[in-house]
Image: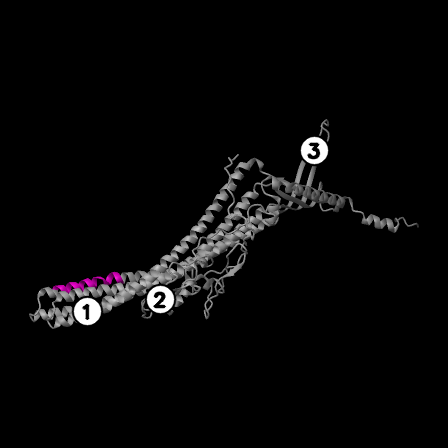
Amino acid sequence: MMDQRPPSSQRRASAAAPRPNEARVRRRAGQGSKTILILLAALVPMVASAGCGLRQWVRNGFKVGPNYVRPPAPVAPAYIDSDNSEITTDPAHDCAWWTVLNDPTLNGLIETAYRQNLDLRVAGTRILEARAQRNIAAGNLFPQTQSALAAYGHGQITENLAAPFASSFNIWATGFNASWELDFWGRYRRTIEAADADSAASIEGYGDALVMLFSEVATAYVQLRTYEERLRFARHNVEIQQGSLDLAEHRFREGVATELDVTQARTSLAQTESAIPPLEAGRRQANNQLCILLGMPVVDMAGTFPPAAIPAAPPTLAVGLPADLLRRRPDVRRAEREVAAQSANLGVAKADLYPRLTVGGFLGYAADDIERLFASKSFTAFVIPTLQWPILNYGRLANNIMRQDARLQGAALQYQQTVLNAGREVEDSLVAFLKSQQQAAKLEVSVQNAERSVELVLTQFKGGVSDFNRVYNTQEALVSQQDQLAVARGEIALNLIRTYKALGGGWTHFCRGRGFPAVYAVDDVSGEEVPTPEPVEGSQPLPPAVPTAESPVEARPSSRRNPQVAATTAPVPAR
């Protein structure tokens, strides 16, 4: 029997030849690729026609809109009181600045507040929200629409208009389709840049919350200690004046003093005693504020604190240079990141002017009979590019660009205003710190002389050399001078706290190396990173107030000297 099979060469040729269905699939894919290339070639000239130079578009990393450059910051070369012997331009001790007060109780309160403060946890949740929003923006770089489908359709078609009847057909399909908008103009990448900057701004907001928290804890603690010292002075003067009253009553009974001396002594004693309740209320209020900052219900912590004086300030204060505020203050850094986010938003608005290229496709099976749905000939795949250009909305899109540009200019001006306010706050706290020290030094001399005067006048009163009127006046002066001295001592510590707050101190001690992402500052448009100061030596790590994920990638500024604020054009009426 003769072999009816074709020769082996013919079999290999027929095997190598594509089947009709495969050829159709390849032909459709090839046509789709050619269409995409044609559309891409047509899009490139549109860059120049819409107002963006082709060279700038390439230079910006195939993105329209300006690359971010940090606005100039108006800072003074030095602080006004930098030549004062108590002020040095050495780098500020801003990591754990509260340790310069040498108060272990305050150190413990700061650490407890970091663990338990609720406002700080709220700031931490904003970081998580911003990071989630950044991940949402990054998802647009991938196919935006994906679906698996199983469909059935029925329809009619007339092949010849003159035919009296139309032929009906069924279609069964199952497979996977997807739609992907190509980021040809950098719209989605600019959105990611804005989200990165917003995420970094939320981190700076967390740092600002730390600065506020630590300064408020230290302030409440110093106020509590100040009230305690004022109470000690007041109670000590009550004892002195009670002794003067006893002496006046004794002399009155013996007939060597008048009743006026007794009434004056009672008046002085009652007046001093009347100052104690407001001081006790002030101490309780400082205690209550401290409890809230520690994230705990209000309780009287009088028994938990060991007796201590008002924290004393160091003899010298290192403040660095005004330019350091750009790197150190979280509110300045947050304002700068907000400018970066708005610069990216301007790029998004400009990208809306250009056509959008979307590539859609289908991969699956389609047949007119369900029994042949999964046959090899039913396999279907195709790619359909779509070009969308909202040219009729040009007026609305152009006005949106001007709106985003105005916001960018406003954000840049707000950043500069934040820098100016930062410098003013440091200057205000510095001069208050220096002058409060001078005031306290004078009051020290005044109190010493007032105490000596009280001793002398009491001795003279006992000997009958002086009347009680001088005793009354001298004791009143002592009460007033001692209370002013306690207030002045507290003001020295409070002004020191305000100075470190104005310098932006405290947040790096917890944000770097303590379970929280490190934050870096950009000091110039070259993109060089300047690390934040290291934590103080010997500090123990603490758990963060809010657990967070890895630090997002912060959008780096471009090294090109592009203007940070785009030029404003005349308004275009919306169509």
Query: Is 334 left, or right, of 375 in this rendering?
Result: left
Mark 3 and mark 2: Cα distance apart in space: 93 Å
State the residue at coordinates (33%, 66%).
301
Q: Is residue 227 visible?
A: no
Label whose residue precedes the other's in the sequence (1 or 2): 2
Using the rendered view, name the quadrant where residue 156 is placed: top right
Give the SS element for disc 2.
loop
Give the SS element for disc 1.
helix
Would you say the residues marked 3 and 2 are in contact, meaning their CB atoms lie under 8 Å apart?
Answer: no
State the residue at coordinates (57%, 35%).
392
Mark 1 and mark 2: Cα distance apart in space: 29 Å
Foreground pick, 571 / 198: 571
Q: Residues within 10 Å of mark 3 (few under 14, many from 20)?
A: few
Foreground pick, 195 / 88: 88
Q: Which mark is residue 313?
A: 2
Q: How is the image coloured?
A: one colour
Number of numbered tags placed on the structure image: 3
State the residue at coordinates (48%, 54%).
201
Magenta run includes residue 274: yes
Q: Amino acid at mark 2?
A: Ala
| The residue positioned farthest toward the left in the image shown | 255
Query: Is 337 left, or right, of 265 in this rendering?
Result: right
Foreground pick, 483 / 466: 466
Label whose residue precedes the other's in the sequence (3 or 2): 3
Q: Position of residue 338 (x, y in %)?
A: 48, 51
Q: Is residue 351 visible?
A: yes
Q: Magenta stretch?
A: 263-279
Q: Position of residue 107 (x, y in %)?
A: 39, 67
Q: What residue would you read off at disc 1?
A: 453
Q: Which mark is residue 157?
A: 3
Q: Residues within 10 Å of mark 1 (few under 14, many from 20)?
A: some
Mark 3 and mark 1: Cα distance apart in space: 117 Å
